[in-house]
Amino acid sequence: MTALARAVEALLFLSPEPLSVGVLAELTGAGELDLDAAIAEVAARHGEGTGIEVAEVAGGWALRTRAQLAEVLDRLRDRPPEDTLSPAALETLAVVGYLEPVTRPEISRLRGVAADHMVSALVERGLLEEAGRDGAAGAVLYRTTTAMQQRFELKGTEDLPPVESFQLTGEEAGALKRRLLGGGHLGDGPQGDG
Amino acid sequence: MTALARAVEALLFLSPEPLSVGVLAELTGAGELDLDAAIAEVAARHGEGTGIEVAEVAGGWALRTRAQLAEVLDRLRDRPPEDTLSPAALETLAVVGYLEPVTRPEISRLRGVAADHMVSALVERGLLEEAGRDGAAGAVLYRTTTAMQQRFELKGTEDLPPVESFQLTGEEAGALKRRLLGGGHLGDGPQGDG
Amino acid sequence: MSRARSGTPDPLGQDVDLDLFEGPLDLLLTLVLREEIDLLELPVAALVRSVLGEREEARWDLETISELIVLLSALAELKARIMLGEPADEEPDPDAIEARERLAARLIAYAPFARAAAWLGARDSACRGPRYRRVPVDGMPPPVEPGDPEALRAAMEALLAFEQPSVAHLDRQRASVPEAIERLRDALARGSEVSFERHIGGRGPIEEAVALLAALELSRVGEARLDQPRPLGDILIRGGLR
């Protein structure tokens, strides 16, 4: 290993947060190209068949354990078994992930239900955090945390699939509109179009 | 690497404490002889010339960074913590500083978001502390600590820069505080305090 | 607080028990929106009872209750519209049309996020393996840069500058702990043992909560002893301890 790769390996090992190439450059004094090579060298040393691996996640690089070892590791450090996310929580995370920074009223408006409780719960679980205030209205802004991005193995929220890929097709949107706008007309028959 | 060696590597990586062979046996279900071999395998993988090493310390085995890298690692330690004071923390400190002693519900009302989480975090960081109970409602009162005042180089909270829209002097201050905290909104008029 | 922890019940995930449907509320709402369950056949009153019902575990905090009420009333409104409709020979109410268009626009705008949530959910199951080292960097933390008091002033002034909405028009329910303590003291003066259920009989949930705080306070200062023979059962308050 090069001296730089050794330093990078030790830094990734020690840091509780993923380290970006920028921070690594600051700490080691090396240039970005050299760092890219060093990271690749560290990643190669922890290849398939070892217990740990290098991952690009939450805006930086991290050393972490391999997925297949989860079971034995959970005996060391209990992951709460109830640590699941409800559909409402996932929806709230999706809204924040795509639109961050975003205010609670905006989340509520999109979801159609009050988001206050859900946002507080996700802040408490460390998946969302405050990100200052909206200049105009003064409402608190929220964004996703490193823990959220690690959990979903995202390099950053820009790593989410493009939102367009989830949009309704024209046909789907048309059907939805017909159903909603038509609903209530006796002329449509008691069942609507269903 | 054997499957056992991979598990041992991941366990040593994750554990904040050195792990004894006994504990490793408990976690992996393997025998001591097999574990000795696995530890040797992990140690061989992290030989001279890498960034981390296996060491027998304090009655157990640990992964740790190599001594030669201390200099670059100290730079990581010396990096000012990322979460110095978030805008949310600053806001909460400001509310308490200007209006102390003040209860959590009052802080929440003024900030417009639940303050419980933030107040607890600031108490934990030693910047806020409890200051008895509110006579009427029985809620816990909070005030800033000496550490907070030192951090902002204040002689006391009366040393805070005056806020333009109000001067905290004597009776007026009391009346203003009652108004700010009483109604959940800044006065009954359209413009608030004026 | 406790409800916010992981694993605690999600109001939309709570089970509803109807003849027509048995399962989580959010699934029911999804099925209704997709018209896989006919809204005309959905007994809204029974649903309201089931969701906000008298069961102990269905007692949510005020914020959640109001969220659920908004949701259920929207459902009731939609059903009413479908049942009563507008006579086919009359011009439909333009306000109603506009409201429906808004709803349609909102659902279309929201659909991507609902699908993204499903993507996240699948990813959450797929990504559960890796574990991150959370050991803090050891050694003395570096000294903190002194803060600028001007930042505190700026934060405070920004807060004061918000024109917060007036809530004066809301009928505020007030309940005073000291008054509740006095009421409980009076009750204890009349008899040495007070049933909590009877003491709060007929009062609303806020007053009930305040009465409980009063009982706890009297217990704390040694004026009363609380006894709850059965879990979730009545609380017996005994006075005359000093």
Image (cartoon, coloured by chain):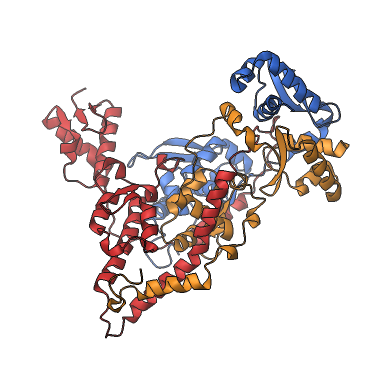
Chain colours: A orange, B blue, C red
Q: Is residue C148 shown above or below A114?
A: above
Residue C148 showing in the rendered view? yes
Left or right of residue B175, residue B81 in this image: right
**Image quarter of residue B52:** top right
Q: The C terminus of chain A lies in which quarter of the figure?
A: bottom left
Q: Is residue A187 shown above or below C43?
A: below
Q: The N terminus of chain A lies in which quarter of the figure?
A: top right
Residue B58 showing in the rendered view? no
Left or right of residue A94, residue C106 in this image: left
The answer to which of C32 and A61 lies nearer the viewer is C32
Residue C129: % across, % down: 61, 38
The residue that appears at 63% across and 18% down in the rendered structure is: B30
Q: Is residue B170 shown above or below C196?
A: below
- The residue furthest left is C190
Give the number of callouts: 0
The answer to which of A48 and A10 lies nearer the viewer is A48
Residue C189: % across, % down: 14, 31
Q: Is residue C154 shown above or below B55?
A: below
Residue A63: % across, % down: 71, 38
The residue that appears at 54% across and 35% down in the rendered structure is: B124
**Image quarter of residue A79:** top right
- The residue furthest right is A2
**Image quarter of residue B23:** top right
Residue B91: % across, % down: 54, 50
The residue that appears at 42% across and 48% down in the rendered structure is: B106
The residue that appears at 80% across and 39% down in the rendered structure is: A44
Left or right of residue A88, residue A5 in this image: right
